[in-house]
């Protein structure tokens, strides 16, 4: 076997890496004992806008610190609970182990069917007509990335439109798949409401064949959702323009209820209509670390669904090949058992009620503290998040001066509030808002 040849920074070639290293100019940043480095000049990527705050929170030594940044549900004790229905499902699965062999590329069939029925409704026309291709994915993020790769491969000239603002990871996911992205108006800041007119005007300018990314419920970060009538207007405009709807459906049950939160999805679920849905079960099943999600692609015919299924499988095969089993088995066990399903629905109701209670309690606490401004708009928002209206400077002051962590956009995770910390949060918000008013 020939000895490998190494190059030094001055162009000398030898077969000895140590000789190369010693011969290189002093202090040369790209030289290692094994030749010219290919990795030395790679720059560190910026920290994730949201998860990076979680790391900073953990490193903060202040005992009074409060984390209202990362989108994780917490109970009244500040803990992320393991649902009782999940414990029972896991007990049953552990008592009757079967295999650790691979799942199909598209995942556990009974999981896909059960989650599709949860999203669309068991008797919904696309399911009855077999117009739905599907896949179990590693979380909602995995579903979004599979959808992005599917779009890149099969709708290569499409631009994906997303709301302004949106979840910060949305543009990163689609840009990483090589897809162009643009934004459409969504938030009416002066009125803390939906900018429906601006949204509809933007849809009118989208090109036929483009894709519009919509939040199915509990919009992240604003918490502002369209009404049923507004959803119909949006769906009418999207279909009239020849645009493909893609719904990110990550919080079903955390807004007004499991059925009520699907009103937007069902506005698009029309006979013969095409749409895509990315679902997550991190929040409503408390299975964050299990990475449990699903992608549903509704086509115009059953034959088209069969073809689309092969393309979804192709995308997955070259990515993660097939999904992990455990989280999907837990969700399928719960949804397919009437007793566990009822228990789960009750636990989702408990989580939703606590979030809504904390939302109203925060508004009351801000008023009691005499914080300048009217924060009653927060009670009209839905889901885990509230777009507080706090500026970046106020958010930074909350973190640096009071150890309260909020996303830079002013998004508050309402589920991070507890009876023990809500008064302090309101007091500190009052301090930073008061400082701004005083200036």
Image: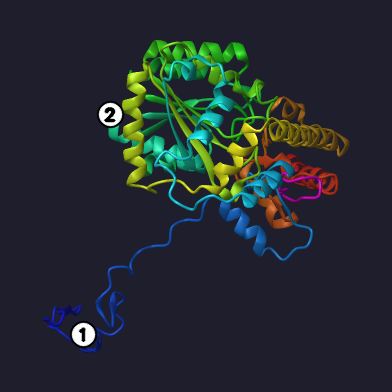
Q: Is residue 50 above or below residue 114?
A: below
Residue 279 position within the rendered picture, expressed as x and y whole percent measured from the top left: 53, 34
Residue placed at 18% from the left, 79% from the top? 6
Foreground residue, 282 or 78? 282
Identify the residue shown where x is 41% and y is 12%: 272
Q: Is residue 307 magenta?
A: no
First in sequence, mark 2 or 1: give its number: 1
Mark 1: which secondary structure? helix
Q: Disc 2 vs disc 1: which is toward the camera? A: 2
Residue at 16 percent of width and 79 percent of height: 4
Q: CA distance from mark 2 to mark 1?
A: 49 Å
Q: Is residue 192 left or right of residue 354?
A: left
- For the point 26% across and 80% down, the residue is 34
75 in the magenta segment: yes
Residue 207 visible to an observer of this rendering: no
**Magenta stretch secondary structure, dominant:** loop
Q: Is residue 320 above or below residue 369?
A: below
Residue tagged by mark 1? 20
Identify residue for label 2. Answer: 157
Horizontal and vertical percent for residue 434?
A: 77, 42
Residue 391 to residue 308: above or below? below
Quadrant assignment for the N terminus: bottom left
Q: Secondary structure at mark 2?
A: loop
Residue 66 percent coordinates (x, y): 74, 53
Which x, y percent locates residue 212?
43, 25
**Which stretch appears magenta?**
74-83
Circle 1 packing at 10 Å, graded few (<14), some (14-19), many (20+), is many
Coloring basis for residues: rainbow
What is the quadrant of residue 332 in the picture? top right
């Amino acid at each position: 076997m020939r000895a490998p040849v190494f190059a030094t920074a001055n162009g000398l070639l030898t077969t000895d890496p140590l000789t190369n290293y010693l011969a290189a100019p002093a202090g040369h940043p790209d030289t290692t004992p094994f030749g010219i480095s290919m990795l030395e000049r790679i720059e560190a990527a910026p920290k994730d806008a949201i998860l990076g705050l979680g790391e900073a929170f953990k490193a903060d030594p202040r005992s009074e610190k409060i984390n209202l940044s990362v989108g994780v549900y917490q109970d009244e004790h500040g803990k992320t609970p393991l649902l009782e229905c999940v414990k029972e499902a896991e007990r049953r699965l552990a008592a009757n182990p079967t295999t650790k062999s691979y799942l199909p590329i598209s995942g556990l069939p009974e999981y896909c069917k059960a989650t599709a029925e949860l999203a669309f409704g068991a008797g919904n026309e696309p399911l009855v007509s077999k117009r739905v291709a599907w896949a179990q994915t590693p979380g909602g993020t995995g579903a979004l990335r599979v959808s992005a790769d599917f779009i890149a491969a099969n709708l290569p000239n499409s631009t994906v439109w997303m709301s302004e603002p949106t979840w910060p990871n949305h543009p990163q996911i689609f840009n990483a798949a090589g897809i162009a992205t643009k934004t459409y108006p969504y938030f009416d800041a002066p009125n803390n409401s939906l900018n429906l007119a601006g949204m509809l005007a933007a849809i009118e300018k989208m090109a036929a064949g483009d894709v519009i990314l919509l939040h199915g419920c509990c919009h992240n970060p604003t918490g502002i959702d369209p009404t049923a009538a507004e959803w119909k207007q949006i769906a009418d405009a999207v279909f009239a323009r020849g645009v493909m709807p893609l719904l990110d459906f990550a919080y079903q049950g955390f807004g007004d209820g499991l059925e009520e939160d699907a009103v937007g999805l069902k506005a698009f679920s029309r006979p013969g209509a095409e749409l895509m849905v990315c679902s997550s079960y991190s929040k409503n099943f408390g299975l964050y670390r299990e990475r449990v999600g699903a992608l549903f692609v509704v086509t115009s015919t059953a034959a088209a669904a069969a073809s689309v299924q092969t393309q979804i499988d192709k995308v997955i095969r070259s990515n993660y090949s097939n999904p992990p089993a455990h989280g999907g088995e837990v969700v399928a066990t719960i949804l397919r058992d009437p007793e566990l399903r009822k228990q789960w629905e009750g636990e989702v109701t408990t989580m939703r009620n606590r979030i809504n209670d904390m939302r109203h309690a925060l508004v009351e606490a801000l008023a009691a503290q005499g914080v300048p401004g009217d924060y009653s708009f927060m009670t009209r928002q839905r889901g885990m998040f509230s777009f507080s209206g706090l500026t970046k400077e106020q958010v930074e002051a909350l973190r640096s001066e009071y150890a309260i962590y909020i996303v830079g956009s002013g998004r508050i995770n309402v589920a991070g509030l507890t009876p023990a910390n809500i008064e302090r949060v309101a007091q500190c918000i009052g301090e930073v808002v008061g400082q701004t008013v005083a200036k």
